[in-house]
Image: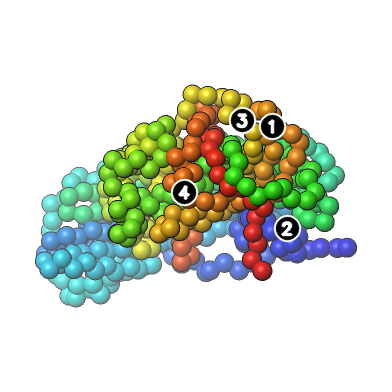
Amino acid sequence: MSWNRREVLGTLGVGSAATLLWALGCGTPARPVVLAPQQASSEVRGWLRDAVARLATKYPVVHALAVSRRRTTGAVDLAGTGVARARRDGVVLTIRDRDGMWREQVTADLSAAGVLAAVRLLAGAVPAARLDLPAPPPPPSAPAKIGDLELRNRLDAIMRSDRAGSSRIVYASALIDIDDVNVWSIAPGHDREQQLRRVRQRATRAAWNGTRPVVSEVERGWTGAIEDQDLDAAEVTRASTNALQLLTPGTFADGEYGVVLDPEVTAMIVDTAVRGLLTASALRRPEIAARMIAGAAVAAPGLTLIDDPAAAGAYGGFAFDDEGGLAAPITLLDGGRVAGRLTRGRRAGHVGMLEPGPSHLRLAPGTVTTQELLIDGWLLEGRLDAVLDPGSDRIVIGAARARELKNGSPTGRVFADVELVGALAALLANITGVGKDTATMVTRDESSGEPQWTSVTAPWVRTRGFVRSRRRPT
């Protein structure tokens, strides 16, 4: 049988298919707004300062946010290598009038005329004005340009680093995705600019196990130069090893077991819990606010969770948020008790709707080794998805694999596509061990076509919960 690359990706259910197809020219992305070559930082700042000065003559609260974003994606799979580039600019002008009413105007035209037009749409014919603003910061250094040849060489290096060397691998791909973002934030009290280069590298492997495909991915992401990190040979080989894992026929008995969660699964739970319970918008729901009051014990005493956008190299990090507030860590859980909530504003792609959300979450590691965490029950590996109903506190966590454990060691029985289900509060309260080894998971989601960058650093943990084979919609 002969398959084309679209059929392979669709049949195997590869998580990166949409991005990979776009990079290889098999899909048609939304057309980006492409303008003239990027303007100098001082010019953009001048347009925004003029806008803020004009609006400040009528409104007590004014903020101007602008972004110039460039995306470069390279991918290689069994059909070849491709590179795609896109550009997106935007401006968000926000005002609050004396009655407390908030309004904003968004435009994709990052130019002197575009910013002025947005001012007039928001506030009418406002005359030019002067406003004493802080001295502007020195412009950040522009990141090194990345040519197609360099990107292709890096992709080839990822593909060559696989040491598994098995003919059972029926599909292999590598992806490098780079977001270069310049953001300006100007208000009567501040003038700020940040330049961020977010880099993701991913390797995907797939193999047949009987009549079903097994797909495995490894991914790494950071903020900084493309040379700062790399998917190493051990990580890429692990993707192949997991894809080649021989699965145990049949199913296991559903029931409550002791479980050890690898960092991917732990990170997925942490991210889902924070979004559903510990943001300012979530806490507007009375049933959540009643449970998540300051000081309430909601998890095991050993758990401390911090959202830290200023962490060095964090994929979800930033120097200031989309309201212009400087990055600072927020402790959400301290020893298992509610210590804070996320209130800082973030916009998808810096131009979407303003809402609170996580940046770089850190679950503090423990002191024990992974081996010391192993118990009779199951070791759950590989994130799939997690769904939380904040009202009932019920959570369903999908994991790629469950390895049976007895006497502190794997038995060799491995089942794919399992779920850990139950009350989130019980799952967190049942944690009896936190490992000292951690890993970082990165996510680039999209909301209304605009990217959202987040990351989570989490350890291995030991808990107890109800494990079952994954339920699929009928």
Q: Nearer the viewer, mark 2 or mark 1?
A: 1
Q: CB of mark 4 within 8 Å of CB of mark 3?
A: no
Q: Secondary structure at mark 2?
A: helix
The residue that disc 4 covers is: 424
Which of the 4 quarters of the picture holds residue 66? bottom left
Q: Amino acid under label 1?
A: Lys
The amino acid type of the residue labelled 4 equals Leu
Q: In the picture, which quadrant includes the C terminus?
A: bottom right
Q: Is residue 55 visible?
A: no
The circle drawn on residue 374 is 3
Q: Neighbour class for label 1 at 10 Å: few (<14), some, many (≥20)?
A: few
Question: Disc 4 on helix, strand or loop?
Answer: helix
Q: Which numbered disc flags the more N-terminal residue, 2 or 3?
A: 2
- Going by the image, does 37 lie left or right of 341? right
The residue under label 1 is 406
Point 82% across, 56% down: residue: 211
Which of the two marks, 4 or 2, is nearer to us in this view? 4
The colour mode here is rainbow
Mark linked to residue 289:
none
Q: Position of residue 392 (x, y in %)?
A: 43, 58
Relative to the observer, which residue lies in front, 302 or 82? 302
Q: Is residue 65 visible?
A: yes
Q: Which residue is mark 2?
A: 12
Residue occupying image coordinates x 33% and y 50%: 291
Task: Give me the C-alpha separation between circle 4 and circle 1.
Answer: 26 Å
Give percent across and percent down for residue 48.
26, 59
Q: CA distance from mark 4 to mark 3?
A: 21 Å
Secondary structure beneath disc 1? strand
N-terminal of the two: label 2 or label 1? 2
Residue 181 higher or lower than 100, as above or below: above
Give the CA distance from mark 2 to mark 1: 32 Å
Give amino acid for label 3: Leu
